[in-house]
Image (tube, rainbow, N blue to C red):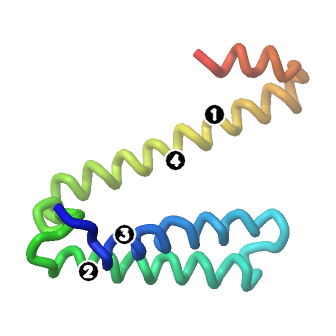
Amino acid sequence: MSFDWLAIPLAIGATVLPFFGVAWLSAGGFASVLFLVPVAGGLAILLVLVVGQYRKKDPLTPVRPISNTLPVVGTAGAMVVGAAVTTLVELVEIHLLMVERHGPLVVGALISP
C-alpha cells in the first residue's frame, strides 16, 4: 500500500490537536480558547478522516467493514471500561495518599499488582 497523502496528515492532526488542547487545561480551563479550538479542530479533522476513509475505494483505515454494530459496540464498551478503571485507580491512589496517609512507595506497591 502506498503512502496515503490524505489520511496520514489528517490522522496526525486528529491526534496532536486534542492532546495539545487538553494539555492547556491546567493553565486555563474548559472555557479557554487554547483548549476549545484545538480540541474542536482535532475532532473536526477526525470526522473528515473517517468520512474520507469510508468513501475511499482502497482506504488505509477500513472504516466501512468495521462500521457494523458488533465492532462498534465492542470498541465503545472497551473505551468505557478503560475510562472507568483508570478513574477508579486514580481515586484509590488519592484516597490512599490523602486520607489513609500512606507514603508514595506504599501506594505504588499496593496499586501496581
Q: Which residue is disc 3 drawn over?
A: 8
Mark 1 neighbour class, 10 Å CA radius: few under 14, some 14 to 19, many 20 or more = few
Spot occupied by residue 66 in the image (x, y as percentages of width and height): 16, 60
Q: Is tag 1's residue or tag 4's residue first in the polypeptide sequence? A: 4
Q: Is tag 4's residue or tag 2's residue first in the polypeptide sequence? A: 2
Going by the numbered disc 1, the residue's amino acid type is Val
**Quadrant of residue 52 within the rendered picture:** bottom left
Mark 4 neighbour class, 10 Å CA radius: few under 14, some 14 to 19, many 20 or more = few
Asked if marks 1 and 4 touch (Cβ < 8 Å), the reply is: no
Spot occupied by residue 5 in the image (x, y as percentages of width and height): 31, 76
Going by the numbered disc 4, the residue's amino acid type is Ala
Asked if marks 4 and 2 touch (Cβ < 8 Å), the reply is: no
SS for dot 4: helix
Q: Residue furthest front?
A: 2
Q: Is residue 31 left or right of residue 77?
A: right
How far apart, in angstroms, are the residues tagged by discs 2 and 3? 14 Å
Mark 2 neighbour class, 10 Å CA radius: few under 14, some 14 to 19, many 20 or more = few
**Quadrant of residue 40 within the rendered picture:** bottom right
> What residue is at 47 percent from the left and 43 percent from the top?
82
Q: Which residue is disc 1 drawn over?
A: 89
Spot occupied by residue 64 in the image (x, y as percentages of width and height): 13, 68
Residue 37 lies, with reference to residue 28, above or below; the image says below
How far apart, in angstroms, are the residues tagged by discs 3 and 1? 34 Å
Asked if marks 2 and 3 touch (Cβ < 8 Å), the reply is: no
> Which mark lies nearer to you, 4 or 2?
2
> What residue is at 57 percent from the left and 72 percent from the top?
17
Q: Which residue is disc 4 drawn over?
A: 83
Q: Which residue is disc 2 drawn over?
A: 51
SS for dot 2: helix
